[in-house]
Amino acid sequence: MSRCFAPLLSALWLLAAIGALLDWACPPNLGRLVTVGAEIQDRNLRTFALLPAPNGVWRFRTDVERVAPVMRDLLIAVEDRRFRYHPGVDPIALGRAVVQAAWYGRVVSGGSTLAMQAARLLEPRPRTVRSKLIEIARALQLRMRYGQTGILDIWLTLAPFGGNLEGVRAGALAWFGTPPEALEPAQAALLVAIPRRPEALRPDRHGPAANAVRDRVLAVGVAAGLFDATDPPPIPTSRLALPRHAPQVVAGLARQPIVATTLDLRLQVAAERLAQQILSGLPERASLAMLIADVSTREYRAMVAGDWRNQARSGALDLTRAVRSPGSALKPFIYAMAFADGITGPDAVIPDLPRRFGGYAPENFDRGFAGTVTAGEALRRSLNLPAVALLDQIGPLRFAATLQQAGAAPVLPRGANPALPLALGGAGFTLRQATSLYAALATDGSGGMLRLFPDAAPTDAAPTGVPFLPIEAARATADVLTRPFPSGGPPGVAWKTGTSWGGRDAWALGFDARHVAGVWIGRPDGTPLTGASGYSLALPILARVFDLLPAAPRSPPAQSRPSARAQALVADGLRLLFPPSGAVLSADGRVTIRAMGGQRPLTFLVDGDRLASEPVRREVGWQPPGPGFYRITVLDARGEAVRSSVRVKGE
């Protein structure tokens, strides 16, 4: 029988040679092959999310290297067992189909090779003799152009799997929730079967028919020695939802066939599950955004951008990019710059007392004042006036420029310049910007936005590594923010909260030795959440975020030996000569408070009230207002402080 077809085989090879000359004139139409959706991959090349092709079809580029070998081998065994030997058209199969059709008066076997099927998938046509002849010509052309691998790639990308599913990747994920790389024999058999009659063999609508054809395909695979005979599992009865994680984020990505990201699928799933639990308990129309990133690589690992299931919560918006007021969340960077400039230090004493800055008179959240506190305590307690006073010395314009250099430019009202309210949230930032800034505190103080792509930074980012804060200042600030348990925050994590005016935005940001995370809660439309605060609302969520991560607590601050300059400053340190602590003074006379050392000008306080003094002098007169106990504090220009407690007795 084979000898009878030898002349036909030679003729086909001759046609293939002629086809090489005509190929340039009639190239195949690859429009359907290149019109594919986007597959978003995580850092381990797992399918993170899928976006459909422009025409709404779930079709994704699939090549033979990205499917299980059993799928490839079973497809060839069932559809085209001489695939590796013919030039695109199998003369034996084609001749047999012609003879059977003539004998029985109907089509018994199609005779189509995988190359002919690929031609039909590229350019669907009515099933006529003319169409079959065109498919034969195209099959020869495709075999010559793309080889066997290219033909398999076309079939794997375009084969129909019922409804708007095309290609093995969409079929495997929709029917089994399994990527094609991990297909098992019974799954591969169903995917080989369905394209024969895509609508008639849909498992969710025609289960018995699909099951019967699947079993026949399995029998072919067993006969070909591809796998052993076993009892196959039941076929699926419903179509699964295709992967769609972080939909608001991936919707804004470039539509490439494959988009690699730095995200981690397992962590993303855990973060989304946590977010859904939290959203169910939030006030009406309130939403949530969360970010998790690796501090060493500056790469995002998980992103929750809002409640995409709920349009009342602006589910389509990417809330990690929403510009909102950070409240007190920027205070750590004011203190870090003050530490770097030598304006103050973590253990230096600074006043938290009523003060006006021109027409601006900030108050604390509780409308009270703490008196004198250390800078570290002022930052931990998020006191407002010390932060504004430090920003006044740093300069709002310089502070804003530094943040911009780090890739997080504050958004100000049109025509406005940076001003002191910047310390308390008087500018707009995104959660992405804020989390990126905290990554600088977690590492070496270098700025730059966190990355979503492994090989390039996002277009809206400053390059990682831009100088932002001296490493000593970053570490000192991080040490201040790392608080012992219990503190309301996650143990071993440096954290800070922020609350904008009226409770419109509740923030919590933190980092340990491996990860940085940010949480924002608010209403997307900007209306207030009455009584909400970063501490009460966002911080507990931040603690739960870190529960998802492997423990990596920050080390306690290293005890370093003081430098020669520091020793000299101690030798000439500020000292209170009179009155000594515990002294008993008389109320009927004026007291001279005397200090030595320190850097002038000195500031003298009694119970937090500032005494008028001359900048060049190291003493001041004080008239006790009456008997009682008093606390005397002297501050120098470096923020160093000395104190004494005295008693004034009556006459």
Image (cartoon, helix red, strand yellow):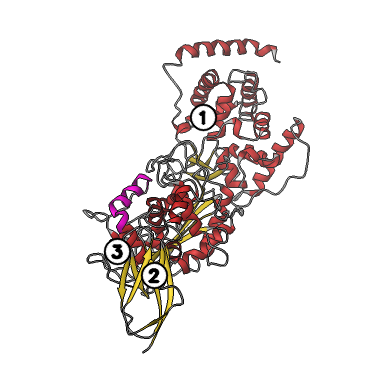
From which residue to which does the magenta span run? 392-407
Q: What element carries label 3?
A: loop
Return the residue found at the far left: 415
Q: Is residue 399 magenta?
A: yes
Q: Which residue is drawn at 59% across and 20% down?
A: 89
Camera-nearest residue between 135 and 146: 146
Q: Pinpoint residue 630: horizontal percent, then vertical percent.
A: 40, 78
Q: Pinpoint residue 588: horizontal percent, then vertical percent.
A: 32, 85
Q: Does the magenta stretch include residue 135?
A: no
Magenta part, dominant SS = helix
Q: In which quarter of the image is the C terminus?
A: bottom left
Q: Name the residue under label 2.
A: 633
Q: Mark 3 points at which residue?
A: 617
Return the residue found at the far right: 229
Three-letter code for the amino acid on which mark 3 is drawn: Arg
Return the residue found at the far bottom: 651
Q: Do the residues labelled 1 and 3 touch (CB within 8 Å)?
A: no
Which numbered disc, 3 or 2, marks the residue closer to the eye?
3
Q: Name the residue under label 1.
A: 120
Residue 503 sits in quarter = bottom left
Q: What element carries label 2?
A: strand
Tell me how far mark 1 sits from mark 3, CA to CA. Answer: 96 Å
Q: Pinpoint residue 455: horizontal percent, then vertical percent.
A: 48, 36
Three-letter code for the amino acid on which mark 2 is drawn: Thr
Tell me how far mark 3 sits from mark 2, CA to CA. Answer: 16 Å
- Mark 3: few/some/many CA within 10 Å (<14, 14-19, 20+): few
